[in-house]
Amino acid sequence: MPSLNDADLPFPPSAVVAGKGSTWRDWQVMPGKARGVSLKSFKTDAKPFSGGNKAADQEAVAALSAELDELQNLFYADRRFKLLVVLQGTDTSGKDGTVRGVFARTSPLGVHTVGWKAPTEPERERDYLWRIHQKVPAAGEITVFNRSHYEDVLVPTVNGWITPEQTQRRYEHIKDFERLLAETGTVILKFMLHIGKDEQRERLQERVDDPTKHWKFSLGDLEVRKQWDDYQAAYEALLNATSTPWAPWTVVPSDSKTHRNLMIATVVRDTLKALKLRYPPENPALSKLRIA
Amino acid sequence: MPSLNDADLPFPPSAVVAGKGSTWRDWQVMPGKARGVSLKSFKTDAKPFSGGNKAADQEAVAALSAELDELQNLFYADRRFKLLVVLQGTDTSGKDGTVRGVFARTSPLGVHTVGWKAPTEPERERDYLWRIHQKVPAAGEITVFNRSHYEDVLVPTVNGWITPEQTQRRYEHIKDFERLLAETGTVILKFMLHIGKDEQRERLQERVDDPTKHWKFSLGDLEVRKQWDDYQAAYEALLNATSTPWAPWTVVPSDSKTHRNLMIATVVRDTLKALKLRYPPENPALSKLRIA
């Protein structure tokens, strides 16, 4: 019985996209660079995609969001691919806001969001990719991960719960896992939402000052904030270790929420367009069919 | 929160076992051999573990089965490891019989069996390891796969549904996947139940002649039998490509059902014993506890 697995691709679809002369290529962490990237070289307040002012950018996001809805419909009909969007970033970096802002108009039938929390007991009793694998997109589906398996090379690494050797081994597991997905038709886009430390202070303060936002705040966030430099270092290490042709990382300057959405929506749109999606061929038998 | 993932092992547990001077080492496909093994060099009617006659072997299997029950209890209490047993082999090679014969006395609480059939529609919409990953054993559990992900480099390969390059890529996926499991505490034992073509004819004939065994027979089995040589070649190729220190293949001569059980039970027993399992340390607080 032939199956979709027969569609194993000769090359990962993301590689095609990453190779194009996209304007957002400058923000991708290109794998295999001798020295790797320095996270500090990416400005958190840059606006490389801006049309000049916030109003123009907001309009552009709205237009892109509508375009994405159409593309998603075609993506679902085509069914040759799956799309996995990974959103990573520190507290307040805007992961929830991205889901709302970018996929606002897209049908929830074709877009699934998974928010990853600390693992449960049954999850901890298997390898850390076990729960992740269960939630990967099916043919024609778009799945957005709000946090992801990359938490497993951040939290335990920063806190010293695993050794540097274990972290390195996990990078390899993750690259292997993503290659499996890519070679069986999954387009993978990974976004690191990059905000400055001052910007985080303002956003946390806002949550404290506004009682209606208290639910978004926990005192634990302040403990994590104390480890800011360690987390930045862990992010830099994972970006360099796990950006691959089949699952590249894009660093998104995210001090501006509007521009963040503009940039991510553009990358997703460009990626979907590069796939040359098409509706399945018409069925000749149907053209002659007359419903009685 | 430290988790079981912190138990990531510096080396895969199976490697320890494979390195010992076990008598069954001769039947393991050792990885990295320059020329690889030839399946024909393994005799299907060999009885290297036999005590001399069938009655003695049956007694030995019963004793081993009881020993496995005790070891499983300890394995569950220890909870540092997971055990995955993979059974592969052509029709009538005795996969069901192995489950019944070897794990007959073991508590179903600690041993789970998964029989893999042709993938369903939702399963075909993800990569072929997606459904497999969902069923891997949790800490302290023993899971037996009756058929497995190796069907995905047998059926489509023999029938030409995937290209030789795709088959090679799948070998790599599978090795990567099994390494992830091994490095997070899973001991993996893979058994190829090796029967001769004449033996299969007899067993199929038996099913045809006995109406109470008709449910075990399908005409499709005869089509598969016609591809005997192709399947033997595909088995030989996968044994050589996917036997690794962390997940070695053992070829089990299976013309004799009793001896097949004897051999597999011995390998599983030896493997569990080599793990130096132990009950978790006693709790000093409990030794002073007087229940009122």
Image (cartoon, coloured by chain):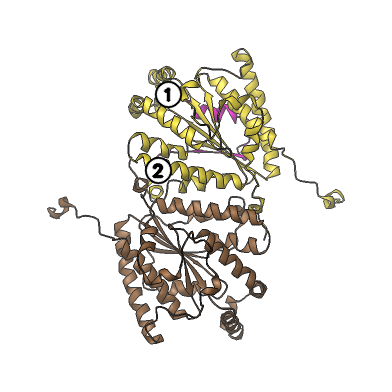
Chain colours: A brown, B yellow
Q: Is residue B108 magenta?
A: yes
**Which quadrant of the view contains residue B203?**
top left
Tell me the kind of residue under disc 2. Answer: Pro
Residue drawn at the location 48% of the way across and 43% of the way down: B174
Tell me the kind of residue under disc 1. Answer: Lys
Residue furthest toward the front?
A34
Residue drawn at the location 44% of the way across and 18% of the way down: B199
Q: Is residue B148 visible?
A: yes
Residue A176 x, y percent position in the rendering: 50, 51
Residue A124 x, y percent position in the rendering: 61, 54
Q: Does residue B11 appear to the left or right of A16 in the view shown?
A: right
The relative height of residue B37 versus residue A136 in the rendered view (above or below) is: above
Q: Is residue A129 visible?
A: no
- On what subunit does the disc labeled 2 rest? B
Labels 1 & 2 near each other (Cβ < 8 A): no
Can you tell which mark lies on residue B213? 1
The count of marks equals 2
Q: CA distance from mark 1 to mark 2?
A: 25 Å
Q: Are the residues under badges 1 and 2 in a single subunit?
A: yes
Of labels 1 and 2, the one closer to you:
2
Magenta residues?
B91-118
Q: Does residue A10 appear to the left or right of B242 in the view shown?
A: left
Residue B135 x, y percent position in the rendering: 52, 45
- Asked whether B155 or B67 is in front, the reply is B155
The relative height of residue A168 versus residue B84 in the rendered view (above or below) is: below
Mark 1: give few (<14), some (14-19) or many (20+) Cα within 10 Å: few
Check disc 2 and report the residue beneath it: B119
**Which quadrant of the view contains residue B278?**
top right
Mark 1 or mark 2: whose residue is earlier in sequence: 2
Residue drawn at the location 68% of the way across and 29% of the way down: B67
- On-image quarter of the N terminus of chain B: bottom right
